[in-house]
Amino acid sequence: MKSTNISRRRFLQGMTGATALATAGVSASPWIGISGGTEIETGAKPRQIKPGAAQKVFPRWRGFNLTHFFTKWSDGKPFEDEFRWMQDWGFDFIRLPMSYETWVEEGDWYKIKESTLEKIDQIVEWAKKHGIHTSLNFHRGPGYCVNPPAEKLSLWKDEEALKAFHWHWAMFAKRYKGVPSKYVSFDLLNEPKRPDDNSMTREDYVRVMTSTTKLIRQIDPSRLVIVDGLSWGRDPVPELVDLGVGQSTRGYDPMPISHYQASWVNGDRWPEPVWPDSEGTTHKWDRKRLEGHYKPWIDLAKKGVGVHCGECGCYNKTPHEVFLKWFRDVLDILTENSIGYSLWNFTGSFGILDSKRADVEYEDFHGHTLDRGLLKLLQEY
């Protein structure tokens, strides 16, 4: 189904007319978020969470990453059926990892292609129509991306890159001002690296995330802002608790399971994974170690911070049985603490559609291949 553009005015009228900010459950400063968990009306029917779960700020969003604007080479062609299928299956969240290169003219940070932004508007409208929250994420922002090629300037050290990063988020803040945070959140930057003394210190990261959040709130005080954990999403950032932002973790550890044979992380150096590795013969992870890995995030949630797992899943070379056993433990730990998740990805090598695994009996689904086993597991959680 081909994407259709919509006018900016009609988009905002449709979004703001449906629900007032108070209805969205947006709480007062200093925390700008969505409270109340699963009473938010969406297409999802999440598992009942026991009283006393650590995470109480966000709904336990469950969904997928859509990669139509992931890199400048991505297809840029969302279609409404994706949202209809998610709703039918009981999900209520998409994360949209985006490269700024998809909406700027080559070599000019400030020359915007409105046609790309209108496609993003269309995604938000479709998501709203089908009861799905959209989290807009800069996967590549001016000055930083976890993936090569590296940006020419550093977001952490160069004022010109920071100025451009601020400018782009200000553009989105103005564009979605008045659209309730029930429908749209801003996830500022994907997977900052592990801090060091040279390229990016903890202080650099906190400074950039703080200044960007404050800029967004000057334009749109009620916008829900989320920041990724440090060390590629692994480590929470307690320095940002008082800023009143949500924080996003990952569901990829141990990497020798989730990224077995993945060329971009030299995954061919790892032996074929097992789960659990109780004998310590391969990656040395089991359920107990996994629980310890997420404990800092659970402790963060207990401080009243909204926590969500913005990416999780497994590359298609890991044996499917091993993947599902490990992933059940990941989802179980997150769910026990009312932490939602977003699978990387919806369609593709980590996804439930067209993942091209060699050991799965796929179902034909509207011209796609559906991994029914993975879908059933996700629906359980």
Image: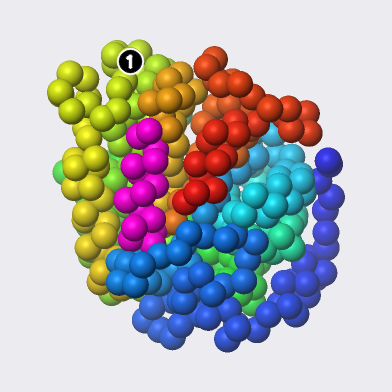
Q: Nearer the viewer, residue 272 or 248?
A: 272
Give left or right: position of 257 versus 75. Answer: left
273 up-or-down from 100: above or below = above
Between residues 158 and 150, which one lies in front from this camera angle? 150
Q: Position of residue 209 (x, y in %)?
A: 36, 61
Which quadrant would residue 282 be assigned to in this image?
top left
The structure's colour scheme is rainbow
In the image, taking residue 303 as reference, residue 50 lies left or right, namely right
Q: Say which of 238 and 216 sits in front.
A: 238
Q: Residue placed at 52% from the left, 60% from the top?
A: 46
Element type where label 1 sits in the image: loop
Residue 271 visible here:
yes
Q: Quadrant of residue 298?
A: bottom left
* 115 horizontally vs 170: left or right: right
Residue beneath the point at 68% across and 54% down: 87
Q: Do we see residue 250 in this rendering?
A: no
Q: Position of residue 54 (x, y in %)?
A: 30, 66
Magenta segment, principal secondary structure?
helix
Which residue was labeled with disc 1? 272
Taking the spot 70% from the left edge, 39% from the top edge, the residue there is 76
Return the x and y of residue 102 as percentages of the image width and height.
64, 42
Q: Which residues are magenta?
A: 325-339
Magenta segment includes 331: yes
Q: Is residue 52 magenta?
A: no
- At label 1, the amino acid type is Glu
Residue located 68% across and 80% down the image? 19
Q: Name the residue nearer the viewer: 5 or 126.
A: 126
Q: Is residue 90 left or right of residue 238?
A: right
In the figure, 17 relative to 46: above or below?
below
